[in-house]
C-alpha cells in the first residue's frame, strides 16, 4: 500500500480532475452540463438526449465571457441547489476576463456566404436530426449545408434530410468516412468546407468562430475548434471526458519550420483538434488530394483520417489554427462497450497513420513517424498501463487494453494495407462517382 501511495505521487491520475469528486476521489457518475455567461449571468442548460443513469452529482459548466468560452468549471452538489448560484460561483472561481483580446486584423475578407457546412453520416437518423436542428439555428447564414450519406443501409437518412429544406442530400456509396469528407470537398462550391459529426450539435456562433481563424491568421488553411460535452449522463461519458476532446481556451497555431523535419515538429497532431469540429480551404485541400480514404471509421484502420490530414496540411507549409471560439457540443459514447470500440479505434488509427500511411511519405518523414510511434508506445501506452495498475477505478483496464491492442494490431501496417485494398475495391465498384485528385504525400 505504501509503494502504491508513493507511485501515485510520482504519476498523477486522470488528466481532467474536474471529472472526479475530489483529489483522490472516484469519478462523478453523472453531471448536469450547462453554459454560463459571465456578462449576463445567464445559465443555459445543454440539451440532454440521454436520460441520466443516476441522479446528477453536480454541474459541469462551459464558462463564457465577451462572447467566447474562457474556462470550464465543475461544482459538486444537487443541481437544483447549484444552478441558482452558479453564475456567482463561476465569477468567483474563474474571474471575469473582460472582453478579451481585440480581434486581429483580418488577413482576408470572408463571411458565411463563403462556407459550406458538411455533415458526414451513416445509419444515425435520430442523431442527424439533432445535428441539423443545431445547424438551422446558426447565427451566420452559410451558402449550403450538405449531408453526405456514407453508404447507409436504408433510406432513413434521406428521409430525415427531407425535413430540413436548407440541407442537400448527397449519397456517397463508397464506405469510409474519408470518402464522405472528400465528397463534400467535391460537391461544395465555396472557399471553405466546415465539417461536424452527426453526434454533435454546433453552437449558434460556430461558423463565426471558424471564420475568425481564417480571417485573423495569415496563411491559415485549416481551422479546428473547441469540442465540449453536450451531456454527461452516463459513467461512460464522464470517463471519456476525463480524457476527452478539450484542447483549451487559447488560440494555438500549428505550423512547421521548413528547415526541420515535419515529423519531429508535428508527429502527433492530437493537440490540434478533431474532425468533429474542423474547416478547411477547399482548393488547398483538393491540391493535397483531400483526405486519405484508407483511414478512419468504416475502414480496417478505424481512425486518424483527420490527424493525417492535419499533418499533411502543416507539412505542406500551411498553417492550422485551433480557435476555441468555434464551439461544438459533442455527444460522447453512452456505454462502456461503445467506449471500448472507440479506444480501440484510437489505437488502430494512430498507428495505421504513423506506420501505414507514413510509408507513403519520404524516407526522412517516415523515419520521424516511426520514432513518434515508438515514443507514443513508451510515454502514452506505458503511462496508461501504469495508471491502470495504480488507479484501476479511474483508469479502467478494459479501455487501456482496448487501445493498446488496437495499436499492436496496426503496428505492422497491415490494417492500412487492408484499408488500401478496400478503398481500391470501393473505387472499382463505383467508377461513376466523382473522386478527389490523387493524394499528395509529403516527401521532405
Image (tube, rainbow, N blue to C red):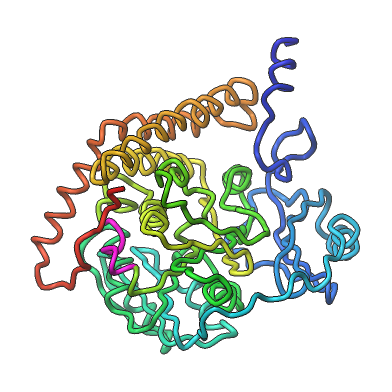
Q: Is residue 257 visible?
A: yes
Q: How many marks?
A: 0
212 relative position to 283: left or right = right
Q: Residue at x 40, y 74 (%)?
A: 193
Nearer to me, 183 or 255: 255
Residue 390: percent from the left, percent from the top?
A: 64, 21
Above or below — where is 379 with respect to 200?
A: above
181 relative position to 98: left or right = left
Q: Residue at x 46, y 88 (%)?
A: 113
Start-end of magenta stretch: 285-292
Nearer to me, 263 or 376: 263
Q: Is residue 341 visible?
A: no
Quadrant in the rendering for residue 154: bottom left
Above or below — where is 392 with respect to 368?
A: above
Residue 24: percent from the left, percent from the top?
A: 77, 30
Residue projecting furthest to the front: 259
Magenta span dominant secondary structure? loop
Nearer to me, 21 or 190: 190
325 relative position to 355: left or right = right
Q: Is residue 427 magenta?
A: no
Residue 346: percent from the left, percent from the top?
A: 42, 42
Q: Residue at x 36, y 55 (%)?
A: 312
Above or below — where is 121 with respect to 76?
A: below
Amino acid at each position: 500500500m505504501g509503494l502504491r501511495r508513493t507511485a501515485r505521487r510520482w504519476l498523477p491520475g486522470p488528466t481532467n480532475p474536474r471529472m472526479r469528486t475530489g483529489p483522490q476521489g472516484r469519478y462523478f457518475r453523472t453531471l448536469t452540463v450547462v453554459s454560463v455567461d459571465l456578462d449576463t449571468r445567464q445559465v443555459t442548460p445543454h440539451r440532454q438526449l440521454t436520460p441520466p443513469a443516476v441522479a446528477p452529482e453536480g454541474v459541469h459548466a462551459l464558462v463564457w465571457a465577451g462572447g467566447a468560452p474562457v474556462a470550464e468549471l465543475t461544482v459538486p452538489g444537487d443541481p437544483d441547489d447549484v444552478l441558482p448560484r452558479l453564475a456567482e460561483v463561476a465569477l468567483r472561481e474563474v474571474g471575469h476576463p473582460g472582453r478579451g483580446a481585440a480581434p486581429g486584423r483580418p488577413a482576408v475578407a470572408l463571411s458565411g456566404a463563403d462556407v459550406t457546412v458538411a455533415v458526414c453520416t451513416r445509419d444515425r437518423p435520430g442523431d442527424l436530426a439533432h445535428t441539423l436542428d443545431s445547424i438551422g439555428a446558426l447565427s451566420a447564414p452559410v451558402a449550403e449545408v450538405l449531408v453526405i450519406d456514407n453508404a447507409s443501409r436504408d433510406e432513413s437518412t434521406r428521409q430525415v434530410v427531407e425535413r430540413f429544406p436548407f440541407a442537400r442530400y448527397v449519397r456517397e456509396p463508397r464506405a469510409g468516412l474519408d470518402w464522405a469528407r472528400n465528397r463534400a470537398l467535391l460537391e461544395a462550391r465555396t472557399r471553405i468546407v466546415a465539417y461536424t459529426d452527426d453526434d454533435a450539435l454546433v453552437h449558434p456562433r460556430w461558423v463565426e468562430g471558424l471564420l475568425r481563424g481564417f480571417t485573423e491568421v495569415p496563411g491559415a488553411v485549416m481551422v479546428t475548434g473547441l469540442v465540449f460535452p453536450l451531456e454527461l449522463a452516463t459513467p461512460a461519458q464522464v470517463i471519456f471526458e476525463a480524457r476527452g476532446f478539450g484542447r483549451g481556451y487559447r488560440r494555438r497555431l500549428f505550423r512547421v519550420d521548413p528547415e526541420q523535419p515535419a515529423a519531429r515538429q508535428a508527429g502527433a497532431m492530437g493537440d490540434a483538434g478533431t474532425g468533429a469540429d474542423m474547416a478547411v480551404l477547399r482548393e488547398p485541400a483538393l491540391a493535397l488530394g483531400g483526405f486519405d480514404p484508407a483511414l478512419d471509421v468504416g475502414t480496417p484502420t478505424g481512425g486518424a483520417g483527420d490527424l493525417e490530414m492535419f499533418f499533411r496540411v502543416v507539412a505542406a507549409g500551411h498553417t492550422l489554427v485551433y480557435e476555441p471560439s468555434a464551439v461544438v457540443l459533442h455527444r460522447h459514447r453512452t456505454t462502456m462497450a461503445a467506449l471500448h470500440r472507440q479506444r480501440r479505434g484510437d489505437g488502430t488509427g494512430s498507428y495505421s497513420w504513423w506506420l501505414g500511411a507514413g510509408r507513403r511519405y519520404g524516407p526522412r518523414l517516415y523515419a520521424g513517424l516511426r520514432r513518434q510511434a515508438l515514443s507514443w508506445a513508451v510515454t502514452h501506452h506505458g503511462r496508461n498501463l501504469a495508471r491502470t495498475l495504480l488507479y484501476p477505478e479511474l483508469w479502467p483496464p478494459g479501455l487501456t487494453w482496448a487501445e493498446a491492442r488496437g495499436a499492436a494490431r496496426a503496428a505492422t501496417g497491415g490494417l492500412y494495407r487492408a484499408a488500401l485494398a478496400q478503398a481500391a475495391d470501393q473505387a472499382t465498384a463505383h467508377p461513376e462517382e466523382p473522386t478527389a485528385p490523387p493524394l499528395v504525400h509529403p516527401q521532405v
